[in-house]
């Protein structure tokens, strides 16, 4: 089994606090339909995109301006044979200063190429991190998905298959 976790990095001119504040606001960059609290240790929130993807996430580590770690407690993908891919994986945001800028390293520990969902996630996460989260950090405006409105090409394809 392949063990390479999914990771992507972005570097911005904003402060670690601005990056942290955007990170703990997934409604502003991932989905407007997140329910629950998303900012403090032990907060639990629910994410869903239509009937295609749902998950329950708990914040298991929060170090202001430095790190946020989410634990995926429950997950469902309509498009995979194993509906529970992602369960017990960790999504980590590491924030640091580098050469006068702020670096965010996003790692989804446990999201590996052997997963059936990997190809779609490999397309979606960079869009959400490199485009939407970056936009929220740099301009105050992200591109989260909203009810019935896909953000990525794969979401568009999955919505079309639904019809």
Image: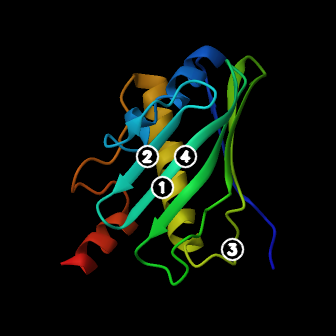
Q: Label 4 crowding class (10 Å Cα cut-off): few <14, some 14-19, many 20+?
A: many
Work out which residue is located at the far bottom of the displayed protein and give it: 81
Q: Quadrant of residue 159?
A: bottom left
The C terminus, quarter of image: bottom left
Q: Is residue 56 above or below residue 36?
A: below
- Mark 1 and mark 2 in contact? Answer it, CB < 8 Å: yes
| Upstream in sequence: badge 3 or badge 2 | 2
| Upstream in sequence: badge 2 or badge 4 | 2
In the drawing, what numbered circle is on residue 46?
2
Give the residue number, with chain letter if any, for mark 1: 55
Q: Position of residue 14 (x, y in %)?
A: 58, 18
| In this rendering, position of residue 57 left or right of residue 46 | right
Work out which residue is located at the far left of the displayed protein and give it: 163
Q: Quadrant of residue 12?
A: top right
- Secondary structure at badge 3 equals loop
Q: Label 1 crowding class (10 Å Cα cut-off): few <14, some 14-19, many 20+?
A: some
- Gap between marks 4 and 1 measured at Cα: 6 Å
Give the residue number, with chain letter if any, for mark 4: 57
């Amino acid at each position: 089994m392949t063990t390479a976790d999914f990771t992507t990095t972005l570097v911005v001119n904003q402060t670690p606090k601005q990056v942290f504040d955007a990170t703990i606001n997934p409604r502003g960059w991932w989905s407007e339909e997140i329910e629950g609290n998303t900012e403090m240790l032990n907060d639990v929130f629910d994410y869903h995109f239509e009937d295609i993807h749902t998950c329950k996430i708990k914040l298991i580590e929060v170090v202001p301006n430095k790190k946020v770690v989410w634990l995926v407690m429950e997950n469902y993908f309509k498009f995979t044979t194993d509906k529970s891919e992602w369960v017990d994986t960790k999504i980590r945001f590491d924030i640091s200063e580098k050469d006068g800028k702020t670096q965010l390293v996003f790692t989804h520990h446990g999201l590996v190429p052997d997963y059936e969902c990997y190809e779609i996630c490999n397309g979606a996460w960079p869009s959400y991190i490199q485009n939407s989260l970056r936009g929220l950090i740099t301009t105050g405006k992200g591109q989260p998905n909203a009810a019935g409105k896909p953000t990525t090409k794969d979401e568009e394809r999955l919505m079309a298959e639904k019809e």
